[in-house]
Amino acid sequence: MNQPQPVKDASPLYEVERRAEHATRPGFRIVELQLSATQKVPWHTHSNISDTFYVLEGQMRLFLQDPKEEVNLRPGEVYAVRPTRPHLVTNAGTTSLTFLVLQGVGEYDFVPLLKS
């Protein structure tokens, strides 16, 4: 089986309603994403950085592996995913989900994973 190749820009890999970068510094960035009720950020991991999710509007359902876990977040709630932990981000509601993802500290990459 081929190992997934890390990419530096994941935007072509999945559709979102809106994507905005709020801060980009060496080793750290803040991105705002808005997902419709049917959109998701597919299974992936990061080699060096953690993802810290902060929900602004809507409801997020986060699926994780190693160990298997499901986390539901509402506005104002935060959850951090350590480097190399596989995760999938979905919209748990019927309206748009808007959230910030703080990524760092370290070099950003997006490693797509094949999960069922």
Image (cartoon, helix red, strand yellow):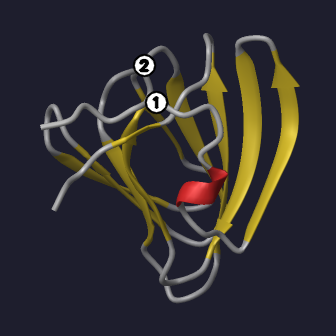
| 19 left or right of 115 in image | right
Q: How many marks?
A: 2
Q: Residue at x 46, y 30 (%)?
A: 6
Mark 1 or mark 2: which is in front?
1
Say whether marks 1 and 2 touch (CB < 8 Å).
Answer: yes
Q: Residue at x 48, y 14 (%)?
A: 48
Horizontal and vertical percent position of residue 99:
66, 55
Q: Is residue 43 above or below residue 51?
A: below
Amino acid at pointer 2: Ser
The residue under label 1 is: 6
Q: Is residue 56 above or below residue 4?
A: below
Question: Viewer-proximal residue, 109 or 69?
Answer: 109
Disc sitting over residue 47 in the figure = 2
Amino acid at pointer 1: Pro
Residue 81, picture quadrant: top left
Q: Residue at x 14, y 43 (%)?
A: 68
Question: Viewer-proximal residue, 38 or 81?
Answer: 38
Residue 35, picture quadrant: bottom right
Q: Is residue 18 above or below residue 69?
A: below
* Crowd class of label 1 (few under 14; some 14 to 19; many from 20; radius 10 Å): some
